[in-house]
Every structure is written in C-alpha cells, then in structure tokens.
Image: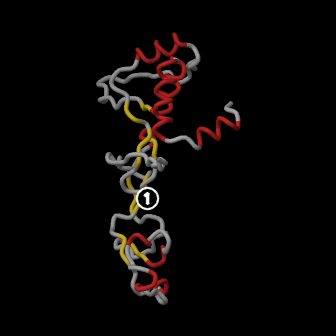
C-alpha cells in the first residue's frame, strides 16, 4: 500500500516520467512485469479452432512466483494486444475483452449550433465572442446533434461496439521551464 506521500507524488508526476518508471519496474521485477501485463494486455485473438478446446478457468495463478509467471506466459500462443483503448465514437476508455454490440452509445451525426436556443438570447458576439463548437461543453443546451436533434448533453442515439481510436495519445501537460 503506497504511503500518502507516494500517492501524492504519483498524482502529481508527469505522464512521461510515470511511463518511464513503469518500464524500469517491469525490467527489474518479473512479478511486476506479470502484474502489468495482466492489467494492460489482453490475450491474442486467435482463429477459431477446428476442434472444441476445454479451458480450466478454476486454476489459480500465483503472480508473485516468477516460475509460475514464466510457465503461464510460455503456454500462451499468438501476440498479446493492448487491453484498454480509447473509443473513437464515445471518447471513453474501454476494455477490448468486454466489447460487444451494445458497449458503446454515441451520436453518429454532427454537433451543430442551435440558433433558436434561449442560451443565445443575450449573447453579444462583440462582447462574448463568436458562437462556435468550442462553447459546446460550457453551453450544452445551445448545441444539438444532427442525428437526433437532442442537446449536447443527451445520451447517444446510436449503439454499437466501441471502435479503437488509433490516433489517441494520452495528454501530456507541458510545464513551463523558467530560465
């Protein structure tokens, strides 16, 4: 269990430093490597076998023992894949092993300004600025989805599986360097 001081440091450290540290911890400890792989990687998607295979799901694996880790890793075939991904449609993280046709709820239309909304009744573009999509989060009732004419805050009108956003990269906060 991390101390309060360590929790604070983890919560206030840059993403790149945490990623680097996690790689070093994996290099230093087979048990840590197994834990990180178990949390961040999913089993490979294998072609359907021609015969029926029986898998014993009642076996408990001791992830603290390196010999167990090695034998577990060596028995698997194929290449593991990233377990968590960002969805292109709903912009939320999802577990690829639990992705089905009802996992994602999203709008498949475009977000548009709702010019008739009372949100804009007292809006003066000379004073408040231009009305555009940058205001959608701050003024959700002033925008509607073209697919269902619901406001920006409404739940998605389309359901389907999550779609991996291959372009997603975690945000990194840039710190100002004082000279």
Dot 1 lies on which element?
strand
- Locate residue 144, reporting x and y percent: 41, 75
10 displayed left or right of 123: right
Using the image as rendered, state which of residue 55 and residue 84 is in the foreground.
84
Q: Residue at x 36, y 29 (%)?
A: 44
Is 106 rendered above or below residue 42? Answer: below
Using the image as rendered, state which of residue 142 and residue 10 is in the foreground.
10
80 displayed left or right of 139: left
Residue where numbered disc 1 is placed: 105
Q: Residue at x 41, y 15 (%)?
A: 75
Mark 1 is surrounded, within 10 Å at the Cα level, by few (under 14), some (14 to 19) or many (20 or more) other residues, namely some
13 displayed left or right of 4: left
- Locate residue 131, reporting x and y percent: 39, 79
Query: Which residue is farthest right?
Result: 4
Query: Which residue is farthest bottom?
Result: 121
63 displayed left or right of 71: right
- Locate residue 175, reporting x and y percent: 48, 48
Is 78 rendered above or below residue 126? Answer: above
Q: Give the image's coloring scheme.
A: secondary structure
Using the image as rendered, state which of residue 5 and residue 161 is in the foreground.
5
The quarter of the image holding the N terminus is top right
Query: Which residue is farthest front?
Result: 179
Quadrant of residue 76 within the rendered picture: top left
- Locate residue 2, reporting x and y percent: 67, 32
Q: Residue at x 54, y 19 (%)?
A: 31
């Amino acid at each position: 269990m991390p101390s309060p001081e360590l929790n604070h440091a983890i919560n206030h450290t840059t993403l790149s430093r945490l990623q680097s540290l996690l790689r070093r911890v994996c290099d230093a400890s087979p048990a840590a490597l197994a834990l990180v792989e178990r949390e961040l990687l999913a089993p490979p998607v294998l072609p359907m076998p021609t015969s029926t295979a029986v898998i014993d799901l009642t076996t408990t694996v001791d992830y603290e023992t390196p010999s167990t880790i090695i034998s577990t890793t060596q028995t698997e075939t194929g290449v593991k894949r990233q377990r968590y991904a960002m969805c292109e449609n709903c912009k939320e993280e999802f577990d690829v092993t639990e992705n089905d046709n009802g996992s994602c709820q999203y709008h498949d239309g475009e977000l548009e300004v709702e010019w008739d909304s009372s949100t804009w009744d007292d809006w003066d573009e000379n004073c408040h600025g231009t009305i555009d999509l940058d205001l959608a989060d701050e003024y959700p009732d002033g925008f509607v989805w073209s697919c269902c004419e619901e406001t920006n805050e409404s739940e998605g009108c389309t359901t389907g599986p999550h779609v991996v956003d291959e372009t997603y990269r975690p945000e990194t906060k840039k710190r100002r360097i004082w000279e």
